[in-house]
Amino acid sequence: MTHPLVRQPGPIPLWLWNGSEPGVTSAFQPIVDLRDGEVIGHEVLSRGQGTLESPHELFTHARMSGYTWELERACWTSALRRISTLPEDQRRAPFFFNVSPDVLSDPRFGDGSTLALLERHGLGPRHLVLELTEKAVIEDGALLQRLTRECSEQGFGLALDDFGAGHSGLVTLVHCVPRFIKLDQALVRDIHLHDYRQHLVKSLVAFSSSVDAILIAEGVETWEEMTVLLRLGIRHAQGYLLARPAPIPGRPTEAFEARRRVAMRALLLRERADDSTVGGLVIRRATADATATSEAVTNLFRDAPQVDHVVVLDGARPQTLVTRRSLAAGGGRQELPLVVEDQMAVTALVGLAMARAPEAVYDPVVVTDAQGEFLGTVTMKQLLLRATELVERHTAK
């Protein structure tokens, strides 16, 4: 349960305010629409001084000292001062401000002082999106619903931050009905190595589309992550791969933009193909390098009980397949797995897969792009379910 913030007695310390000067600095990280490379907003990040430079150390120290509200005001003041000096075209994209539940539920947030602070810098609620973190939510659902409704009525945008990091994200999602849902970076990190996460993200993409919410992947750091996220349907992202936080709002690097265009062209070509192709089913699975020893591959299964199979790669090309079943039977690596391109029709692949030898008929199918580079695998369960959907769709016409 949240409680109104109570300021500690005595003067406000210099690490928070030095007279009228906030003791924090602001940085901005762009949120990018991967379709066209345009920036749809900037997350505002705050940094302290000295040993409190880290945001985690800064906000923890403020909470322990009883200065959470004063710190939030310092962060807002620092950021709004910077934003107010920007050219008009840079001020149009909304700025995403993290707001703790304690601050949101504090009477001082809704007493008019927040709107007055914005107005003092020539800004309004439409310029801001309030990010509510799932890591620290308001347990009172009715209170959360009322507070977020009031914020929406005032013109603020709403985002659910760190989605997937806590236990009550779905409850918070229902109560605040956010325009933006930001996937926690714990879901994004190394997603190309975790098929369970890929299935989860794919379902969240479908959900966000159905409720007209914008899903944003946070903390994207590698092209392996980006490539899988694109294939899963993620269209908005933020992270070091795109651009690092900077004192002035900026855009992704030129190197990122050049590679983004190539990736999107390839993706759009696949999307324009018939929706019954295998590419739409692909999930990136666990892989091992061709130089890995048999013991190293065995350890992959031992350390990850959820892994059903591992694809051994020679560079970017699939070489062999190891299934948990074949490993337990002492068969080891399967030298000739079924490998197909992502543009193969689902119905054609079902026939091809079922024609395999009896002992291999239920093995996963390895999928590559037109250049023969590994994309992921498709299980027989996925294939049969999709084939059934296509038959039912055709019958219903």
Image (cartoon, rainbow, N blue to C red):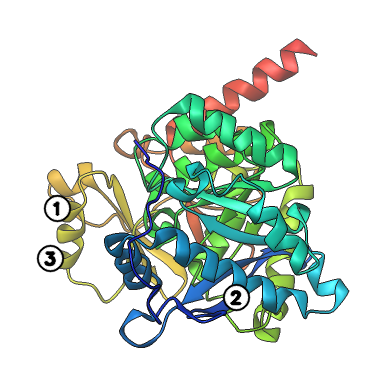
Amino acid carrying mark 3 in the image: Glu
Residue of label 2:
78
Horizontal side, residue 94 vs residue 366: left or right: right
Amino acid carrying mark 2 in the image: Ser
Where residue 248 appears, x then y in whole percent? 67, 83
Classify the position of the N terminus by image quarter. top left
Q: Which mark is residue 295?
A: 3
Give the distance between the C-alpha atoms of the residues marked 1 and 2, in whole angstroms: 50 Å
Q: Which is more toward the observer, 212 or 67? A: 67
Residue 146 versus residue 115 in the image, above or below:
above
Instruction: Check disc 1 and report its element: helix, strand or loop.
Output: helix
Q: Which is more toward the observer, 99 or 386? A: 99
Where residue 208 appears, x then y in whole percent? 63, 38
Taking the spot 45% from the left edge, 46% from the top edge, the residue there is 101
Residue 223 versus residue 15 in the image, above or below:
above
Q: Earlier in the sequence, mark 1 or mark 2?
A: 2
Residue of label 1:
302
Where residue 331 appears, x then y in whole percent? 18, 50
Crowd rating for badge 3 (residues with CA inside 10 Å; few <14, some 14–19, many 20+)? few
Q: Is residue 351 visible?
A: no
Q: Is residue 228 visible?
A: yes
